[in-house]
Image (tube, rainbow, N blue to C red):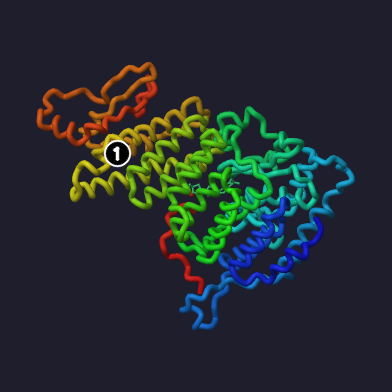
Amino acid sequence: MAGLREIEKQFFPLQKIQDVIDLFKNELKDNEPNLTLMSIVLGVIENILTVNRAVSSDADKSNTLEPIFPVIELSTIEALYTKFVTHIKRSVDKTKFPDKFATRELVKIVSDVVWCCLSKSFKDRAHLQSLYSFLTGNKLDCFGVAFAVVAAFQILEYNDVHLSLSEDHAWVVFGEDLKETAEVTWHGKGNEDKRGQPITASVVEKSWLYLNGQPVICNRHMEVAAIVSGINPSINLTVDSVEMGSLQQELLWLLYDLGHLSKYPMALGNLGDLEEISPTPGRPPPVDIFEESIESSKVHYHNQHVYPYTYLGGYHYRNHNYKKALKAWAEATNAVKNFNYNREDEEIYKEFLEVGNDLIPTMMKHVASENASRIHQTSISYDPDCYADFLRFYDGICEWEEDSKTPVLHITWAKQLVNSLAKFDPTVRKLIHLISEDGEESSSSSESDEESEEEREIIQDENRNQKKKVKAKKGKTHDKDKSDKINGKAEDS
Ligand SMILES: CC1(C)CN=C(N2CCN(c3ncnc4sc(CCF)cc34)CC2)S1
């Protein structure tokens, strides 16, 4: 790949969101969209709108709705682009690698070419995902390193090296029919990087970090989706750049319409979150997008992805649809239970810890207070579906822990479980029939014969058709800067 093509240059200067959309639309027509160019462009814009926000000096601007989209000059982009291309071409002697496909040795060399420039300072800050961050600050996060390696291979004109993504890690696939894998970045804190090594079946098996062999394997267009999905509109923990969020949202719809999100559940989840914050007229509601994310995981990844369910659960929780939230979280642990928990899976552990020990308790408290004012029937503490999903949630967590080298549960879990259990009304606990694997039925509590005939009728009327069978395993009597962004989004002024 040489310098920027004339057709790319004609889009500059970029002065509004639509100019960026037009540039990306043009790149995506190509079967080799220019990853380096697009990563640098998004990084420059993100930096101006979130990190180095122009403090408007003239007072009048502060109270107009006039957006502050920066003017992106071609010279700025071209200088950074040339710097990266030159760095890569100067560091790799292609004559030593005559093959059409990349080799493990070459993957390690290119990973080193990126790696050697990185500053050793902390790497889990925001806005470190783009080549702009690499070229101006010598900083990249875990994803950013893997992406930079893939962009470098595009410059070296290898079209077999692609990004492979799990829900908390990134690596590359390469070789004829992409059958080779290699670590190219680090993961987590305090873990020795394994760069250059293949990801073996034993590492992958029953591992959430490697999605049990069902990662998102990107083509060039999905690699564009990854950098767009990786846009971080956050200015700080509670305020987002409205412009940056809109740009990300419009680019994700562009990629969606072109079909490049169909095998990328997390990108669909990101789009659903953005639609919740600011709905696009004429587009499906967030729940439909979260359902598409779940469907994508079922169709393409054997339902092994967990985040599609936590995206949906989080949405329902924020919107007080507690019954649907419990159902989504039960399905999330139904997905995670097939993995064995290990020390590199903290991110998903933190998700479930928050659900079990913060969101569900808060929900049960909220509902308890609501009860006073609402008819019993509609409250989750009287609903056997909710109680069943609550039990399924914990059943999945316990099964996840089984056969794992690292324990999941500790006393806090047990305390919160008892606390939440107690919030369900005793009547609802009688309506759950636990079925063991061999089909043996048992009631979840002894029928108390002093129960008044009248109480029995109330229960039956309220919940006649709501008897729920909860499948319980025989002998297993157990029973993310994702904080809600309040609407304090920055007025870009
Ligand atoms: C439901 C949630 C808790 C909300 N946000 C979540 N994420 C935000 C977006 N994330 C992502 N979104 C798109 N692509 C990727 S690739 C990857 C692994 C490191 F490379 C992470 C990730 C990760 C997960 S999960």
Disc 1 packing (10 Å; few <14; some 14–19; many ≥20): some
Image quarter for residue 103? top right
* Residue 412 picture location, percent across and down: 37, 38
* Residue 134 picture location, percent across and down: 69, 57
Above or below, 493 relative to 199: below
* Residue 223 picture location, percent across and down: 65, 49
The furthest residue to the right: 95
- Residue at 62% across, 72% down: 15
Left or right: residue 144 compared with residue 488: right
Image quarter for residue 250? bottom right
- Residue at 60% across, 48% down: 260
Front residue (pair 48, 316): 316
Residue indicated by mark 1: 419
Would you say residue 9 is visible in this rendering? yes
- Residue at 24% across, 29% down: 431
**Viewport quadrant of the N terminus:** bottom right
Tag 1: residue type?
Asn
Front residue (pair 139, 63): 63
Above or below, 409 relative to 266: above
Front residue (pair 188, 244): 244
